[in-house]
Amino acid sequence: MSDYRDELEALAARMLARPDKGAVADYIPELRHVDSQQFGIAVASIDGEVVSAGHADEAFSIQSISKVFTLTLALGAIGDQLWRRVRREPSADPFNSIIQLETEKGIPRNPFINSGAMIVADVLLGTHEPRETIGEILRFVRFLADDESIVIDHHVARSERQTDFRNVALANYLAAFENLRNAPERVLGVYAHHCAIRMSCRQLALAGLFLAAGGINPRTDSRIVSRERARRINALMLTCGQYEDSGDFAFQVGLPAKSGVGGGIFATVPGRASIAVWSPGLNPSGSSHLGSIALQELVAMRGWSVFG
Amino acid sequence: MSDYRDELEALAARMLARPDKGAVADYIPELRHVDSQQFGIAVASIDGEVVSAGHADEAFSIQSISKVFTLTLALGAIGDQLWRRVRREPSADPFNSIIQLETEKGIPRNPFINSGAMIVADVLLGTHEPRETIGEILRFVRFLADDESIVIDHHVARSERQTDFRNVALANYLAAFENLRNAPERVLGVYAHHCAIRMSCRQLALAGLFLAAGGINPRTDSRIVSRERARRINALMLTCGQYEDSGDFAFQVGLPAKSGVGGGIFATVPGRASIAVWSPGLNPSGSSHLGSIALQELVAMRGWSVFG
Amino acid sequence: MSDYRDELEALAARMLARPDKGAVADYIPELRHVDSQQFGIAVASIDGEVVSAGHADEAFSIQSISKVFTLTLALGAIGDQLWRRVRREPSADPFNSIIQLETEKGIPRNPFINSGAMIVADVLLGTHEPRETIGEILRFVRFLADDESIVIDHHVARSERQTDFRNVALANYLAAFENLRNAPERVLGVYAHHCAIRMSCRQLALAGLFLAAGGINPRTDSRIVSRERARRINALMLTCGQYEDSGDFAFQVGLPAKSGVGGGIFATVPGRASIAVWSPGLNPSGSSHLGSIALQELVAMRGWSVFG
Amino acid sequence: MSDYRDELEALAARMLARPDKGAVADYIPELRHVDSQQFGIAVASIDGEVVSAGHADEAFSIQSISKVFTLTLALGAIGDQLWRRVRREPSADPFNSIIQLETEKGIPRNPFINSGAMIVADVLLGTHEPRETIGEILRFVRFLADDESIVIDHHVARSERQTDFRNVALANYLAAFENLRNAPERVLGVYAHHCAIRMSCRQLALAGLFLAAGGINPRTDSRIVSRERARRINALMLTCGQYEDSGDFAFQVGLPAKSGVGGGIFATVPGRASIAVWSPGLNPSGSSHLGSIALQELVAMRGWSVFG
């Protein structure tokens, strides 16, 4: 493991030395103030060990990465019935586009674009109060990471709600097509809060390790999902996890992954490891600039692509 | 290998016994007359051995599967310059849709939809005569399969040209956006002919084995492409190989694959094997009905998904 | 005038005798209960006289016809500056489509589709309270019709707000593109209330008579708008007044007109007369079924098309 | 009539003195060489008199204005059956867009966009040879203008065919949806030739005068179409004649009109006059720059808008 650690340390040092850092997301007011001079990486292997480097213990807003966990919970709740309300195809349009929602009658393309994640949030809400559902999601993530210190940043959640006009439009469009059971405002409340979960790279790598390990968390030895479901969530991350850049990401990196505008990227190497990287500056398509580069370098060095 | 053979024989028998066979493609007149009561499968492992069952030695029209081989050739000719003229993203629209071509200014989404494959054909044409380019493609496929008996069915090629109004539209649209170097008719000639290559499952599995074997054909020990290029072609097959059903196919099967309306499907298990299945009846999305089911069953039995 | 009256009486009788009445709008709960066995018509000539027949004094919900009056007010307030925020082109899509709003960056196609009328409502709101703006619109309509008995049906306005998910989406989309000055909820409040104005055919014909009379209300001899502006509002009604059926309506009827889902249609015969018809049953495109037929018959009898 | 003449002379002088002339169309090679320093105007009143000014006797390529004449012929041939194959709605997209053709299953929006005019050409072709149909169209235009000197410029027709990739795409798309009876190449031949008719402003004003005069040519006293059909062709020109700028043109000018990329515009003042203007420089939307301005000034001076 020690050469591993050296490799990650060198990688983190190279990233922190680069002059290009990308631009911190500005559309959620509270996220604007994050210092862009940060980079962290953590790799959890399927035997449960974690190696990390850089700011790997700094908590950040995981944003859309949370959709992987809510999808897992919703599949646990209603199984394949979910696919009556959301599809499993990449979207050619950006994550917040409403066009396909109109032409495809209120059925989102996949559970990782915003409208699809709202369907997932609506499933989790069921007949509960938003507060309860938000609590359930947080408990699940803490359980996955085996770490009670994970919290939701309510400032960020409220900040997002103030300028989320497009999300309000998407949720109301789902309601217009009768693809929401709960009022749009309640669904948006759950959505904004699970996006505002704060985690470190280390916590994130551990929380998602079950997806690399056939559905089992090797640290706690508990089965989270069946092997088949783990595979399928990985497949969705690969084809849809980077929105309209998913094809390019598969071509360049070759791993199932999910990014968030907070600068985090979570990836799985099925049968081997999970990876979390974080650096707040984004590239034009809204993924972490340094995170993407680091992931690409690490995968090349290790030969970790799922494509051979 | 003998239990392998039994497994494939049993699979072929199960498929041939099913009452549902799908419907033979009717839009290319010459393809209408194929007997739908056929099923073949061949698996080539990276050590070069082939196991097969059913009608695995029956030649069929490989149609769009040929795009994997022309893409390989074009990348060999001009490398990453290809990506200036065609993208690497899944298309949300059907394989012959023209909408994105207009909104995206004549740059096809990926090299597997029809318009993208026409760019590839145009690259291969270069300054040659169509006849020469068609010959070059055929020689390449024979070389890959190490089999000089592979031919092009000129009847099928001519038959396709008589009713290919949408393809004519696509090629002229590419020309309108100055993304063709050659006249549309010449490009369409090359395109129709490489789609009309006839191969058996056995030949197809061998011809594509290099994609499972890190770029090397293990039977002839010749390097076809670099390991990185093999990976990337696999990535493209996984994200774009089944057109607008690529997401679902990745979710259900989890392997890089390319289908053709002749009823063939070619798939790779990186680091392990290549697979060719064939049955002429198609499902509503234009892939082999029995072929898709067989592939799914085989992958489940063998645990061959790239997703763990 | 007496043969005129006979003609309208006969027309009303023919309409009421028809077995086909169309279907009453059901998407605004409060409108569902209107008796479909009603038909009224009123024609106001530019000398100020009104002839009517059938249920011409029955008040009904004018719905989108109100957009003609709010447009007139907004042009009075800010003149051609309005056209920086909304265009003047027919929309190929339905009145509540959001697709063009995304592809055209939040600039609605014209002031008669829902999103365009929201821009108009936002202009009228300015820095006022919704209650004040609603009052201003109502006073303007009363002034135009010279009739203080015109009211807003607050039940209908509230009823509409309960199920207007698509309108909420449109307003939030305008806000996302920074084409609203006021909060979406305030704009939607004004919008729902001006749509809920109740008027009779007689009141409506009089209120809009200025558009047929070169901008002057001949009954009160007051100039409402310049002759040029009256022309231009007529032009907008002809090209955009029936949403995606405007072309067909111009082809069949040949008059500037605006319909509402309450079953009213208002039309102008420039230089001659204004017409209001009402019958609650709608045709599939959302215009009054009998109203459209009656208008077509009247125009044919009188030779009133603007096209010769 | 003499003050009329003075008015037009002054208008022509003002136009020729302007420094802004627009840009001559360059996408048809043969049209590039036309001198942009030209402006002509002719007004034919419904009593048959013609007043003209500037280069009103200079022949130019009428291009899409010819679609008014072919539409008239096709309606004469098959009447309202035409509307099964083409609609009567404005197109939100440019004249050569293919998007709506795909989403609306091969039914063009209206007979003035290119695809719609190809349907009209296909109707006229029927079972004839292209040469015969082209001859029939030319004879009809000569008959309308009562002028045997009108010709087709075959150089322009051939020149257009060399670079009409988008039109080839459109025609093949119509064929793919089985909305062409003849081979695309034959339809395109007829289309290119009727667009290449050369006429002067005087000839054009006379040829279209029947549309202003209730369907009768007042010079020859022959009925061309019924009054109702003349009205309806005027309605189509107003709602669809300027492609995606039809709404703006109706708003600014307020007359039925059809433009061509050769720099001509034909307009009708129903019940009064027909107008032909010509100046080769185009504005960004492809209509004559000076022609549009002149038409707007003339209509304002004369109060000729159909909207009051």
Image: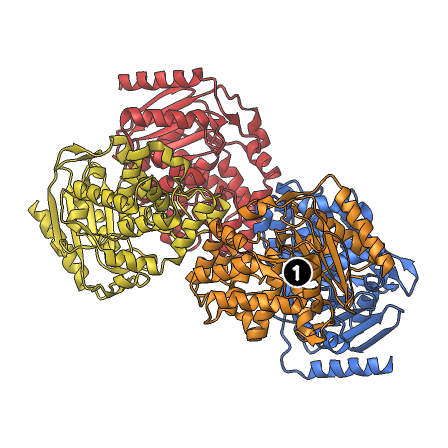
Chain colours: A orange, B blue, C yellow, D red
At 74% from the left and 74% from the top, the residue drawn is B299
Amino acid type shown at disc 1? Thr
Q: Residue furthest right?
A: B221
Residue designated by label 1: A239
Please report, as a chain letter, where disc 1 is located: A
Quadrant in the picture for residue C75: top left
Quadrant in the picture for residue B302: bottom right
Q: Residue A95's x, y, as percent?
A: 57, 54
Q: Residue A50's x, y, as percent?
A: 77, 62
Q: Residue A197's x, y, as percent?
A: 59, 59
- How many circles with numbers are drawn on the protein? 1
B252 left or right of C224 in image: right
C194 left or right of D151 in image: left
Q: Residue furthest left?
A: C2
Q: In which quarter of the image is the C terminus of chain C?
A: top left
Q: Can residue C88 be seen in this view?
A: yes
B263 left or right of B271 in image: left
Q: Quadrant of the N terminus of chain C?
A: top left
Q: Is residue B137 visible?
A: no
Q: Residue furthest front?
A: A149
Secondary structure under tag 1 reads helix
Q: Residue B298's x, y, as percent?
A: 74, 76
At 15% from the left and 49% from the top, the residue drawn is C202
- D188 and D264: which one is in front? D264
- C290 and D271: which one is in front? C290
* Mark 1 crowd level (few <14, some 14–19, many ≥20, 10 Å Cα): many
A223 left or right of A48 in image: left
- D305 and B105: which one is in front? B105
